[in-house]
Amino acid sequence: DAGITQSPRHKVTETGTPVTLRCHQTENHRYMYWYRQDPGHGLRLIHYSYGVKDTDKGEVSDGYSVSRSKTEDFLLTLESATSSQTSVYFCAIRGQGSYNEQFFGPGTRLTVL
Amino acid sequence: QQQVKQSPQSLIVQKGGISIINCAYENTAFDYFPWYQQFPGKGPALLIAIRPDVSEKKEGRFTISFNKSAKQFSLHIMDSQPGDSATYFCAASITGANSKLTFGKGITLSVRP
């Protein structure tokens, strides 16, 4: 599992509430990613980080923000959750090799009612 | 425009048979092509990957075949087993400092006993 943990693993929340998901890694990887997985859409990149306090948007970043104040933690925040953000969220890290080998965490299932 | 397209959408194979999953890409700058395997309730796991300087790569029962001129690559699972039943994603990326993986939508493989 490349030393990646995600918390919480499951969350049910209501529309309009803020939600923060945490990704924690133990192996000092520089690159970290947040994806969402939905039926029929595969895995879509939300945001990624290439170092402490260095982040950039992915293809589905609207409604999400991220922060990375320490190498080991990458936080994904939904400022005001909507039902369209009901999904499974995966964090990934990039391995140390030359190519973009990514290793995924166990996921967080988020339901927005 | 979907840059990475998988086919078929689902696949049923008998135990001991060969499973073949295809992936087509648009961007000729892609230079890294991984396949991921995902079991229900788990994160995607890197299965095997190929670079365009080789036409085939084999790891155990899993083989990637790469056709640069056709912009296609495929995953072959020999002697398919019920334990191979999972969702399979192809992906592609361009090597670089902030490279990102572009994923196909995934296909569900069922191996019948």
Image (cartoon, rainbow, N blue to C red):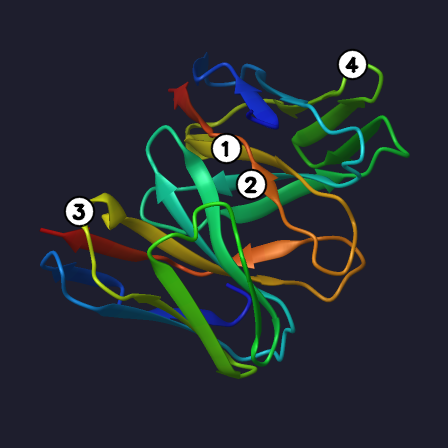
Q: Is residue A101 left or right of residue A2?
A: right
Label drawn at residue B36: 2
- Which residue is label 3 attached to? A83
Nearest the viewer among A37 and B41 is A37
Q: Are marks 3 and 2 on the same chain?
A: no
Q: Is residue B50 left or right of residue A88?
A: right
Badge 4: how crowded within 10 Å, few (<14), some, or many (20+)?
A: few
Quadrant placement of the N terminus of chain B = top right
For marks 1 and 2 on the same chain, the one whose residue lies earlier in the sequence: 2
Camera-near label (3 vs 4) is 3
As helix, strand or loop, the secondary structure at mark 4 comes to loop
- Which residue is label 1 attached to? B88
Q: Are marks 4 and 2 on the same chain?
A: yes
- Which residue is label 4 attached to? B70
Q: Is residue B44 left or right of residue B97?
A: left
As helix, strand or loop, the secondary structure at mark 3 comes to helix
For marks 4 and 1 on the same chain, the one whose residue lies earlier in the sequence: 4
